[in-house]
Structures are given as C-alpha cells and as structure tokens.
Image: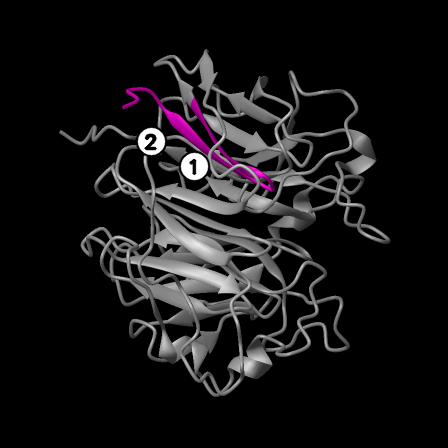
Amino acid sequence: MANGPVLLIGTRKGAWMLTGDAQRGTWRETEPMFLGHIVHHAVLDPRDHRTLLLATRTGHLGPTVFRSQDLGQTWTEASRPPAFAAGDPLERSLRAVFWLSPGHAEEAGVWYAGGSPQGLFRSEDGGDTWAPMAGWNDHPNWPAWAEWPEEGTPDGSMLHSVCIDPRDPAHLYLGLSAGGVFETVDGGSDWAPLNAGSVAAFLPDEEPEYGHDPHCIRLHPLQPDRLYQQNHCGIYRMDRPEGRWVRVGDNMPTEVGDIGFPIELHPRDPDTAWVFPMDGTDVWPRTSPDGRPAVYVTRDAGESWARRDAGLPERAWLTVKRQAMTLDDSHPVGVYFGTTSGEVWASADEGDSWNQIASHLPEIYAVEFADPVDRSS
C-alpha cells in the first residue's frame, strides 16, 4: 500500500497509477491495468481511503464497474453494474459508465454513476450493486432535457459532474453534455434546470431553460453555495441563492478565450480555480490555442486570470479532457493534468511551474488524486 500521493490515470487503452514520494518530486509508474479497455474514470473513496472504483468498457463486453480494496492489486466486477431498468419504455441501453462520484460524507458506501446516454445510477454498498435512479431516468422531461434520441454532442451524450452539497445529502447537482445543469433538493425524486445566465450560442435561442453543454461543474466544499463550470460557451461562476451564472471567462485574454473542458477549485480557497483552455474556434480543433499550452489560474473568483506555463512545452498541439485535471490537498496545493497526447504533468507549487511525470501513455481520459492514508487523526 502506498504512503505517498497517488494519481489514478484512465486512458483509452487501460489504467495506470503514479505514486509520488512525500515531496511530490519523484513518481513511480505502475504496469497497466485493464489494458485495452476504455477507462473513463477511476476514483478512490475519500471516506474510507480503501475502496477504489473504476468505470470501464470494451467494444464487445460493454460498460461496467470494477472494485478494488487493495489499491488496484486485485479487482472484482460489480455483481450488478449500472443499467437502465428492465423494460425501459425509451429502450435505452447504457453505452458507458462515464462518471463516478462518492456520496455524502455521512452516507458510507453510497456512490453515484453518470452514464451515456445520460442516466444516473446509485449504489449503497460501495459500488457492488447499482440501481437506476427513477426520479431522474424516468422524469417526464428527461427526453427533452437529454435531447433524446438525437444526442447532438460529437462523442455522444453523457451525464457527468455529480456534485453533492456537503451540508445536505439530498441536495445534488449534475451536468448533461448536452442538456445543461440540473438540481435536486429531495435526493433525486425531482429535478429542475439551473441554467439562467449561461449562454448556448449553438442554439437559435441562446438563453434557453435547458439545452446547454456544461463540460465540467465544481462545487466548493467550504462554500457550497458557490459553483463554477467550464462550459462549451465559456467559464461561469454561480453564487447561490441567486441561481444565475456569471461568465467570468470574459476576463480571460481575448486571444486565448475561455473554452475548455476541466475546471478545478482550490480545496481551501473558494476564490481560486484552475482551467486549461483549448481552441474552440471555427471547427473546434480541441488543441491548445495557437499550439501554446498553458494553465490559467484565478485567485479572485474569476475577476482576473494569470497564465502559468513555466516548464510546459513552448509548442504542443494537445488538450485536457474534463476529468483529466485534479488537485491534491497539500500545502501548497499540487496541480496535475493528463493530455490527449498521453503525458501527465505535475506542479507542486499551485501551477507556478510544471514537470512531466509520465509520457507515452494512451490518450488520457481521467486523472484523479487519491490519498490511500487517512490523515484526519
């Protein structure tokens, strides 16, 4: 069992782990796990520091979830993986388990999974058995919210960014790509769109009630009335109870823009966030703007942004997917991201400088920080 920080890497062709020393200066790469499988997400339960879930699929075996209790040394497939209910009237079939979120801190064993198409599933036994959440999957507005069966996004639709209010396990947010941001205050029995202020420039009505394309949503654990999202149409912040998104990405440099996939929040400072912009112009190349990769950070809740590229390549045509950026909780905070070109980059000084800690991996879909040691005592 590792004693240092661990990064869980999901790729188009399997999963890897990177284990760092206490100073986060040296990293060791494991052999691949699930080689050849598409690994959309891998997450260690922060409540027990032991249960590791991995969402995967192959072309012929379909989507499922695997569980490990020993940090990936051995794995067991869920005895009942996520799936739409038998006899589903819309005839939906799950193509991928796209997102995994541990439940509320007081609900041990509870997990949520987002799928493609945009189904929501819940486990109450640490990820062994999963049940569809009827309040969402069978909501009368689901076909309209999820754009079913058209599914307008290029890579297919997905439900992602399941965020739980730390004050109330019945209060959840989620994102649909495409569809928008949605909220429940009753544990998932009913849902409502939460998209006011967000622009959907690709629709005839650019400010609809739903139909947006959030790429990633984050809720700050210490100030849970503050949310951020990296959207298809910019970077936004919301402060409740106003319930309206403000486009803080307008403060990014014009030549860079505010289009990208990931957004990550400082664990102790609700005003600090990191993004990785990409070229979202014309036909959406999905590469670094002008081939010059950089992370941008705000320390004033989006009022201003600063470029951080020390150590990164001067020219590189890559980008970072929505689950492929993560933070640790050290002092100072470590920032990490994985690229579409198979590299993992790390910063031990909150993004001021960068080092490559892995290379030549398959296309990276997800990077998650994991702490296998309970440091609360």
Residue 328 or residue 84, whichever sits in front? 84
| Amino acid carrying mark 2 in the image | Gln
Expressed as whole percent of the image width and height from the top left, the position of residue 91 reads 54, 82
Label 1 is placed on what type of residue? His
The disc, 1 or 2, on the residue closer to the chain's N-terminal end is 2
Q: Secondary structure at mark 2?
A: loop
The extreme right residue here reads 282
Instruction: Name the one closer to the observer, 32 or 320.
Output: 32
Percent across and percent down for residue 78 are: 33, 55
| Along the viewing direction, whichever of 190 and 309 lies nearer the viewer | 190
Residue 31 magenta-highlighted: no
Q: Which residue corresponds to the image point at 41% horizontal and 33% vertical from the top-left?
A: 369
Number of the label disc, if any, that sits on residue 73: 2
Please provide percent x and percent y for residue 182: 47, 70
- Residue drawn at point x = 69 percent, y = 64 percent: 153
Tell me: 290 left or right of 215: right
Query: Crowding at label 1, few (<14), some or many (≥20) Cα neighbours within 10 Å?
Result: many
Q: State the quadrant of the C terminus.
A: top left
User: In this rendering, is residue 48 above or below 155?
Assistant: above
Farthest residue in the front direction? 60
Given residues 40 and 153, the one toward you in this image is 40
Circle 1 SS class: loop
Q: Is residue 238 above or below residue 139?
A: above
Start and end of the magenta stretch? 1-18
Depth check, mark 1 against mark 2: the one in front is 2
Q: Magenta span: helix, strand or loop, mainly?
A: strand
Q: Is residue 10 magenta?
A: yes
Q: Is residue 349 left or right of residue 157?
A: left
Q: Residues within 10 Å of mark 2 (few under 14, many from 20)?
A: few
Report the residue marked by disc 1: 266
Q: CA distance from mark 1 to mark 2?
A: 31 Å
